[in-house]
Image (spheres, rainbow, N blue to C red):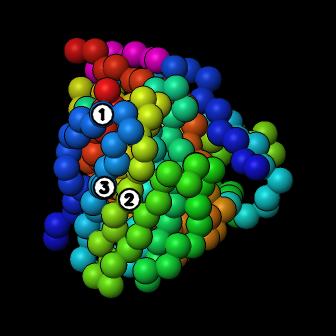
Amino acid sequence: AQTVTQSQPEMSVQEAETVTLSCTYDTSENNYYLFWYKQPPSRQMILVIRQEAYKQQNATENRFSVNFQKAAKSFSLKISDSQLGDTAMYFCAFMIWGNMLTFGGGTRLMVKP
Amino acid sequence: KAGVTQTPRYLIKTRGQQVTLSCSPISGHRSVSWYQQTPGQGLQFLFEYFSETQRNKGNFPGRFSGRQFSNSRSEMNVSTLELGDSALYLCASSPGPDRANYGYTFGSGTRLTVV
């Protein structure tokens, strides 16, 4: 079974600063997918960024980038130029093709003005 | 293009009752998955349907059931409600089984409170 661990229950960052959210996972699979989802107070889970395990290049989406370390089973999310609208719960998730998402416990991020 | 629609948004039920939650996927999406979100257990997978067939099921008791209709709309049912069933129930849709590449689109959930 796969497990996903987010060791930071809460974090805060000043507006315009950079913050990194940590995620580690455990699996015996070699091909899989990793995701970061954002859940604002509206409750809808929104996909932030996606990484395929067989790709060594780290994924980037505008101000969001990941540091994927396959050997260490680590998948951290870096948010640059933090904005007030980034305040939300962030979930790291793991998926093997054809299966369901396995989520971490989440990190509550507060962006302060 | 309308998103994933879940109804109702809020629901209060009494222990022992049953409840039905509804999810309308994005038009053209044929795969629907359900997740339960609680403060204690986090996000847990309930089940997944594709073309009216259950493809995967999570580790939940038989009181939790679901189905998918020919128009891809899905319902989940919880019978004999317990206090521990209080949760946010999230539905997610995808064009097909290849959710890893197509991704999920989530709805805003149904907040169920059991009293």
Residue A79 in sight:
no
Give the camera-side residue of B69 and B40.
B69
Give the camera-side residue of B11 and A41.
B11
Q: Which residue position is annotated with label 1?
A: B14
For the N terminus of chain B, the quadrant is: bottom left
Q: Secondary structure at mark 1?
A: loop
Are tags 3 and 2 found on a single chain? yes
* Callouts 1 and 3 close, C-beta under 8 Å: no
- The quadrant in which residue A15 appears is top left
Chain letter of the residue carrying label 2: B
Chain letter of the residue carrying label 1: B
* Cα–Cα span, label 1 and label 3: 13 Å
* Callouts 3 and 2 close, C-beta under 8 Å: yes
Of helix, strand and loop, which mostly describes the magenta segment? strand
Which of the two marks, 1 or 3, is nearer to us in this view?
1
Query: Residues in magenta?
Result: A10-15
Chain letter of the residue carrying label 3: B
Q: Earlier in the sequence, mark 3 or mark 2?
A: 3
Q: Is residue B32 above or below residue B10?
A: below
Left or right: residue A16 versus residue A5 is left
Q: Position of residue A106 (x, y in %)?
A: 50, 31
Residue placed farthest to the left in the image? B1
- The type of residue carrying mark 2 is Met
Q: Residue at x 22, y 59 (%)?
A: B5
